[in-house]
Each structure stands twice: as C-alpha cells, then as structure tokens.
Image (cartoon, grey):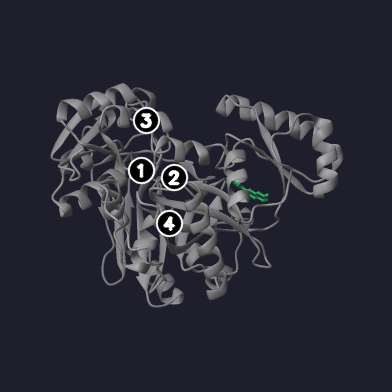
Amino acid sequence: MDPMFKKILIANRGEIALRVIRTCREMGIKTVAVYSTADKDSLHVKFADEAVCIGKPAGADSYLNIPHIMAAAEITNADAVHPGYGFLAENSKFSQICADHGIKFIGPTPEMINKMGDKITAKETMIKAGVPVVPGGEGLLESVDQAKSLAKDVGYPVILKATAGGGGKGMRVVWEESEMEKAYTTAKMEAAASFKNDGVYMEKFVEEPRHIEIQVAGDQYGTVCHMSERDCSIQRRHQKLVEESPSPFMTPELRKKMGEAAIKAASAINYESVGTIEFLVDKHRNFYFMEMNTRIQVEHCVTEEVINFDLIKEQIKIARGETISGRNYEPQMHAIECRINAEDPYNDFRPSPGRITTLHTPGGHGVRVDSHVYAGYVIPPYYDSMIGKLITIAQTREEAIDTMYRALSEYVIEGVKTTIPFHLQLMQNEDFRKGNFTTKFLESFKMK
Ligand code: MV4
C-alpha cells in the first residue's frame, strides 16, 4: 500500500466526522463523507471533499452498514477509513474487511480489538502483563453455586459483569448471598439479550471509585507511550458528562505508576493506534484495570489541550506507518470538557431532538468548541443527542472552571433543551470545585 494516504473516508457523522475532516485538511488529505438521508444537511457532508449517501436514517441501514460503506470507499477510491467513535469503531469484522479490501483501517487490527473486546480475555492478558486488576474469580461463572462459593472467597460485595459487555450493561452488584441467585440469572439474561453471549464473571465490588483513564499511543513497530490521564468520574447511567485533565485526584507518583501500567497494557497486545486504558481508582489510590477502548474517544480533546498535541493527526500518522518517539507526556495546562447534549436536565435528561432556532457559540481566551451544529440545524432523533463539546483551558483547575462558567453563560441554544443548565450548576458546586467527587457523585446531585 502507498504509505501516504491521499483520501480518507470517514465512516461516521456529527462532530467527530468534522473533527477528522479538519485534521485531514491540515495534512493535505482529501476526505469522503458518508451520510444517511437524515444527515443530508449536516456540516460533515458540506465540509468533506466528496460525500456519498449510504442509506436510511437508522444506524443499521447506514453508519453500521458495512457493505454500503465499503461500496462508498471503492467508488471514491479512498485508501483509508477513519471510523471515529461509536458505530463501527470497535468492530473487528469491519477492521478485517477494510484490510481484505486493501483499505487501511485507521485504528487497531481485528486481533487487537478482539483481545480487548472480550473482557475475560482482556483481564487474563492484563494479569500476564503485570497490570493490576480487580480481585475476583478467573474465567466464566459456571453455576449459581459456583458463584456463591467464589463470592465467599472474594468477600461481599461483589459485581457480576458480562464478558462481552462494557459500559455497564449486564452488570449486577451483589451485597449478600441471598441476592446471588437473582443477580446471576438476570445478569446472564441481560448479557444474552444485549450481546448474544451470556458469559459472566465476578469481581470484588470497588465502592465509590473514581474513573481515571490513561491515553496511550502505539506505533506499528512496538513503541508505546502514554499521554497522561483524564478523570471521567462525572457520569450518569454510564454516560460521561464532564471530563478533565489532569485529574484533581492525581499525584505525580500515581501518574507514573498508572502511566507505566497503561504502557504495559497496550504493549501486551502490541497495540497500534491511539487508545485508552480505563482504571478504577479507590480512595486509597489503588488502581485496577477496567477495560481498554481501542478507538479515539469523545473526550480526547482535553488531552489534546493539556499536552498541546493533535491526537487525530497522530492516529493517521501511525496508520500510515510513521514511528512515534516513545516519550511520555505530562499535562502542561488544565482542561475541562462539558458535553452539551440535546437533553432536558430538569426532566431526567430526556432526549430533546429538534430544530436549533437560535445559536450563539462562546469564544474568547481558553475556549474550544467542537460541534457540528448551526442555527437552523435539526438534531435527528436517530443517533446520540450530542450538540457539541465545550472545552476550556487554563493554567489551573480553578481558572478552567471559572472560564467554563463564563463560556457556558455565553452559550445560547434555543429550540431544544440542553445540558447547559446542568453544567452551570455543576461549575458552582462546592464539592465539584474542590475536586471532591467519585463515580457516585451524580446519583445525589439535584438540579435547583
Ligand atoms: C466496577 C465497579 C466497581 N467495582 N467494577 C461500570 C462500567 C464498566 N466499564 C465497569 N463499571 C464498573 N465496574 C468493580 N469491580 C464500578 C463500575 C461503575 C462505574 C465505573 C466507572 C464509571 C462509572 C461507574 C458507575 C457505576 C459503576
């Protein structure tokens, strides 16, 4: 294959499609947008050099339809595909089909995706590599009785997780033996329904953890580096709402240890591309491997801002066979990202799709907005409800929060409900401002 990419097809929509197009422009690479009929007026379609309609609105008919996307790549003569996040980004079959057609998948190989996609395989790989994992049983649970006897050894509370899962589906916390039978049965049923794989395993339940993840990059020649952490503890029902770097809970010693563990994790599978190692961190600063995301993530921008580095450019360079230096990166700034979603924070974050009638986007010093919307744009009901990401950058966490409050106050979006009122209240919350939060924080957060 020609080591230079002349044309990249972006198998995604929304802000991430636009994000990839922007970097391709800077690199002199032509772009192909694909779009569903619901997205014909989207900016990613207008900003790309070429655009191909790939089907009806439903994901299965368009952004998840591999034959339609491959046809678009072939007729436009694209030499690489960028999957963005979501949709086909962690689909090993898609990565394989791209390879079979001589089209470079800008991301990891199918083997790497599969090794991390199955959680028990990932955990076994991490144990072998010397990466700390949550104590628990090895392998799949075979019966309720086995689960009960294992839980006696591990110690309650325990958590049952689907091996094909991730992101919270098929999980059950079990506080005492009397709850085991029901939890085991429902976890298996949910796993079978969600993933067509009912395998579940057990771990000690870590109470009130923080979710801290390490960005990594690896090239095709075995060099891996880390790019520091993001704190993603501010989540609601496994949906992240705020991410920041550095983590207010981080210390230089912990960063060094977690960075080294993340490098071991990625090296263990010879990881190629940019990726993220997710850890649970308990109140004593013990950390445990949770899962690896083998894609670019929504929140990659906070890392870009604190280390002043274009992660999409890096991803493309790695895919075309360039080497990385292997040096690690420390945060030089503080960055916070608020996800601006078309959801009603006063109404259980219910989706609020529809037409944006008025739009004023914030700007000024220390403000970055990654968004694909414009005044008059209609947010379709078929996909996620993200309107955009508001990122602020400053020398200190306190200043980044103050800039965020100011920028949120400037943001005017009319026509749909948004998460802006939630973020305004969060930025004024005393515990948030002190950095005093875990993954349970939003369970008790009440809108005023
Ligand atoms: C855990 C845990 C506590 N103990 N595992 C949630 C999604 C999936 N990736 C794993 N998750 C958890 N695994 C053990 N052994 C708590 C969670 C968890 C969580 C993790 C990160 C961010 C938010 C969370 C919310 C609820 C539960």
Dot label at residue 216: 4
Q: Is residue 431 left or right of residue 32?
A: right
CA gap between label 3 and label 1 equals: 11 Å
Is residue 414 at least partly visible in the picture? yes
Among numbered discs 2 and 4, the one appearing first in the sequence: 4
Q: Residue at x 40, y 28 (%)?
A: 93
Q: Is residue 102 left or right of residue 107?
A: left
The three-letter amino acid code for the residue at tag 2 is Thr
Does residue 25 lie above or below 161 as drawn?
below
Name the mark on residue 96: 3
Is 278 placed left or right of 89 in the picture?
Answer: right
- Of residue 128 and residue 355, the one placed in the foreground of this image is 128
Q: Name the residue carrying label 2.
A: 294
Q: Counting residues from the N terminus, which is met first, the one under dot 4 or under dot 1? A: 1
Residue for point 38% across, 67% down: 327
Callout 3: helix, strand or loop? helix
What amino acid is labelled 1 in the image?
Gly
- Contact between marks 3 and 4 (CB within 8 A): the answer is no
